Amino acid sequence: MADAPSIINNLDTQGKKNQLRLGRLTAEYGDGDTITSIACSPLTTALKEGDVIMINGQSMTLSAGAAASATSISINSLALSQTMMRGNSIEIDQENLFTQYQRKTSGQIAGMPVTADTLGPITYSGGKYTIKGAQTQYIKILPRDFMINEDGSDEPLYFKDATNTGLQVNNADQEMIATVNIPVGCTATEVKVWGSVTTKVVEVYEAGVNANGKGSAIGSGTTNGSAISITSTAHTQYNYLLIIVKVTATSNRVYGGQVTLT
């Protein structure tokens, strides 16, 4: 009788085995042969690179994925220790079941729904992970993140809330300085700052909570909102970005900014 197409009907429950039959060999391979692929009847389910299958007691690892109904399977080069006959079952063995199960792409894990590229609030796309409720792509630089430097006579930095909003210094000699933390596991790559006058100079430095000094600028631009490319700066236990906006008049307003993360 021909094999039933359903996966359920391919469960072999004889004796103490609990194996999932994926198909059968349609060719013979001799003891001592070195093989990189096998011919099979149409697979009952899709396989992925790295999956481990079992044929006649011999374990082999897929070197490439294989679609459901595929009639060949690519494997890592393997020297056979015994002959594999036409009709031998291709199975996922119980011993490897735990490993195979780790690529789970449906159902739930700890109550979180799973798909091919999501786990609850976590999404994987284009080589990047995003988490709902956690910002890992950029950080907003808010007015509250700014302070003034020591130039001038201790005048305040204030937020203008009239028709024209934004941060303003109260002395033209002063400059605005923002300090921005880099989240764990992220790297800062760009800075943007927006202001009422788009030509004010912006300088970016890497500073540390454990050391004096700001060193040399790692990037510079202006307050026109264009991306300022900076030396890629990965999170460490101590570092942060120090961003200096060189306003030159009390009428210069700064709206805020953004730090791009990877």
Image: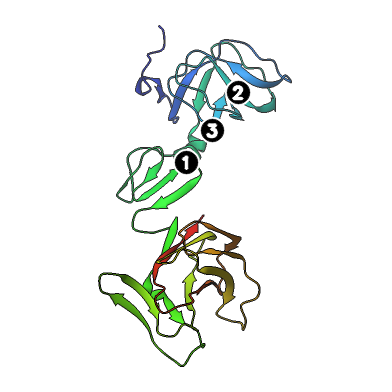
In the picture shown, does residue 100 fall above or below 73? Answer: below
Image position, residue 238 (x, y; %): 56, 75
What residue is drawn where x is 74% and y is 20%?
Answer: 32
Of the numbered discs 1 and 3, the one sitting upstream in the chain is: 3
Residue 141 visible, this orientation: no
Q: Residue at x 46, y 39 (%)?
A: 103
Q: Which residue, given by chain and number where applicable, does mark 2 sit on?
A: 74
Disc 3 and disc 2: Cα gap in Å?
11 Å
- Quarter of the picture containing the N terminus is top left
Q: Distance between the residues labelled 1 and 2?
A: 22 Å
Kind of residue at badge 2: Ser
Disc 1: which residue: 98
In the rendering, at what x and y percent does residue 82 appear?
Answer: 67, 21
Name the colouring of the figure.
Answer: rainbow
Question: Which callout, 1 or 2, points at the residue further toward the start of the chain?
Answer: 2
Specify which label sits upstream in the sequence, 3 or 2: 3
Q: Mark 3 points at which residue?
A: 51
Q: Which amino acid does label 1 sit on?
A: Phe
Q: Which of 26 and 205 is in front in this view?
A: 205
In the picture, measured across the screen, residue 39 lies left or right of residue 110, that is right
Provide residue 172's location: percent of width, then percent of height. Answer: 46, 82
Tag 3, which secondary structure? loop
Crowding at mark 1 (Cα within 10 Å: few <14, some 14-19, many 20+):
few
Indicate left or right for 4 with 85 as reference: left
Relative image position of residue 75 (x, y in whole percent): 62, 26
